[in-house]
Image: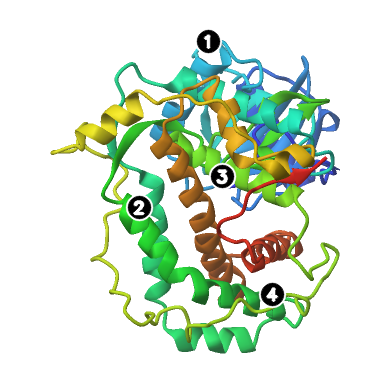
Amino acid sequence: MNRFPSATPISPPHRKLIAEEAAVVLAVCRAFGIHVLPEAVESLGNAGGFSGARLWRVSAEGLWCLRAWPVEGPTRAELIVIHDLMLQAAAVLPFVPRLRSVPGGGQTCIFLNGRLWEMTTWQPGQADFHADPTPSKLIAAVEALARLHRVWTPHRPDYGICPAVLRRMGKLEAWQALPRERMESALGQSDADLRPWAEQALDAVRRWFVPAWEALTAWSKIAVPLQPCLCDVWHDHILFQGETVTGIVDYGSVRLDNPATDLARLLGSMLFEAARPAEGVSSSQSRAEGVSPPCPRLRFGFQRAEGVSPPCPPVTRQLTLPARLQNEPARLAADIARPERQPARPDENARRHPSLTWSQALDAYDGIRPLSEPERKLAEVLDWTGVVVALTNWLRWLVLGERRFENPTEAAKRMRSLTQRAACRSFPTENYRFEN
């Protein structure tokens, strides 16, 4: 989910309220104790996201962000849990949006016109790391994430299989179940500007499907500590003023997971996008002729390479895990609970070039919230397998038309960016470095 509970993109699509939405929006504002005229409310649409949420900026008693959650979810019970976690964090962290309560009732969400609504403070700043990438800003981002995780860390965490691993395996299973003829037919009928990038995305999935499955399967047998995590924290959800983080926004995907999930999502989006594009690819290109197909190919991504065993039976994607796994690996649990901190050892390239590596970013996080060696390795696996899984999602959404987007051009750019990354010769063992 790509939602902005209290922020907009650098160039938000502001507009005045239209008649059919004004009555509902003003009624919701009154429910939250804010009485305004339509002129004090700006509609942001989906604010550049793809979740189906709708947002408005309200100018009254300060600045507020009004959000209508998608009909598909979260449910009221889920939203109450999310709000409890936000309230806990906002009490000690200034970059967490503060929820506004309904006067007299203490409720932080209401149901009206078929949707759940919430109102949060409008966090200052811009999601401008890509426009101005510096090591100090990256360090600030990972340290802010570590502080949030530390607030949410239980005294005695439960252990279980990383839910992000199970979710990725489920997505790959769904991809494998697709009739190949359906994708091939849809690809031939797709938009001429989209087709070259979709073909490259499909090539990347063909190449990396089996390695991704095998990497995830290995982690589906290892227990890790579980706690509340954001699960969709990326570049556009981190707001800066100068080099200070002033907002971490969008808590709609919060669920039980391992912090490596958030680190993978955040660092992958910030470090790769800030790096130079793939060799032979200009960031301004609108077509994919400059990307060399990442062969050797599988026919569609469903065939298995020689000597590679078929995937294990379908895994459960139930996110409510038992408090303790039976026969929990004691050695791994002890390693995770008592990580050994080591000083950063930048390599020769890092000393020659003023840059920051993935490892050094993890060291910065570890300075706030201890990060075990298994969690470091898990973050890398979740990052690169996340690219493969994301490509299958975008192929289904854009080529098969399984989702409709308010801004199809921006959606296509997301797939193009992932395709460029998968085409890098260093993928998936990138050093995640960017130049000052």
Q: Tag 3, which secondary structure?
A: helix
Q: Is residue 192 left or right of residue 160?
A: right
The residue depicted at 43 percent of the width and 66 percent of the height is 211
426, 153: nearer the viewer: 426
Depth check: give the residue in front, 94 or 338: 338
* Label located before the other in sequence (4 or 3): 4
Tell me which amino acid carries mark 1: Gly
Label 3 amino acid? Arg
Q: Secondary structure at mark 4?
A: helix
Question: Considering depth in this image, is 105 or 127 the residue closer to the camera?
Answer: 127
Whether residue 92 is situated above or below residue 47 in the rendered picture: above
Q: Which residue is mark 4?
A: 197
**What is the number of the mark on residue 104?**
1
Q: Earlier in the sequence, mark 2 or mark 4?
A: 2
Q: CA distance from mark 2 to mark 4?
A: 28 Å
The image's mark for residue 166 is 2
Q: CA distance from mark 2 to mark 3?
A: 16 Å
Q: Which residue is mark 3?
A: 265
- Specify few, some or many for label 2: CA neighbours under 10 Å numbering under 14, 14-19, or 20 or more: many
Residue at x-position 63% and y-position 80%: 199
Quarter assignment of residue 320:
top left
Residue under the point 23% across and 66% down? 313
Q: How far across and down, in percent of the image, does residue 121 sit? A: 68, 22
Looking at the rendered structure, the kind of residue marked 4 is Trp
